[in-house]
Image (cartoon, rainbow, N blue to C red):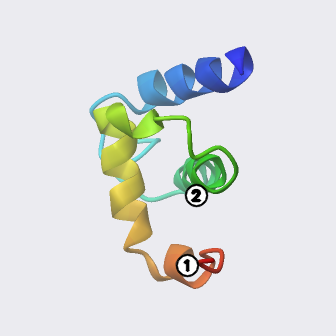
Amino acid sequence: MDKVYGSLRAMSQGLGDRAWCTGNHYTLADITVGCALGYLDFRFPQIDWRRDLNLSRLADKLALRQGFIDTQPPQS
């Protein structure tokens, strides 16, 4: 779990206050971060990564994109 938390810190610091991971445009980096955060929600719901406001802001924005909507796991 130390690696998970370390990765969350690195993603948060890398994102900073930018709109997207690598600047002003949606890129593969954003997809990668979004997939990682989605996986944490799916497999490790006890990890409260959403309290990090910049990761939460990015995840909320990504959740509105059709590709993320179409690939959500089924709700049980």
When the figure is inspected, residue 65 is found, relative to residue 42, above or below; the finding is: below
Give the x, y percent position of residue 46: 56, 39
Q: Position of residue 75 (x, y in %)?
A: 59, 78
Q: Which residue is mark 1?
A: 67
Labels 1 and 2: the sequence-earlier one:
2
Q: Which quarter of the rendering shows the C terminus?
A: bottom right
The 10 Å Cα crowd at callout 2, few under 14, some 14 to 19, many 20 or more, is some
Residue 32 left/right relative to 18: right
Question: In terms of secondary structure, where does tag 2 sit?
Answer: helix
Badge 2 amino acid: Ile
Q: Quadrant of residue 18?
A: top left
What residue is rendered at 46% in x and 35% in y? 48
Q: Position of residue 60 (x, y in %)?
A: 35, 58
Quick check: 20 above or below 4? below
For residue 31, the mark is: 2
Quadrant location, the N terminus: top right
Q: Which mark is residue 22?
A: none
| Viewer-nearest residue: 29 or 41 | 41
Residue 15 placed where, x, y %?
A: 41, 33
Under mark 1, the amino acid is Gly
Q: Are marks 1 and 2 in contact (CB under 8 Å)?
A: yes
Viewer-nearest residue: 47 or 22: 47
The image shows a total of numbered marks equal to: 2
17 or 2: which is nearer to us?
A: 2
Q: Residue at x 37, y 73 (%)?
A: 64
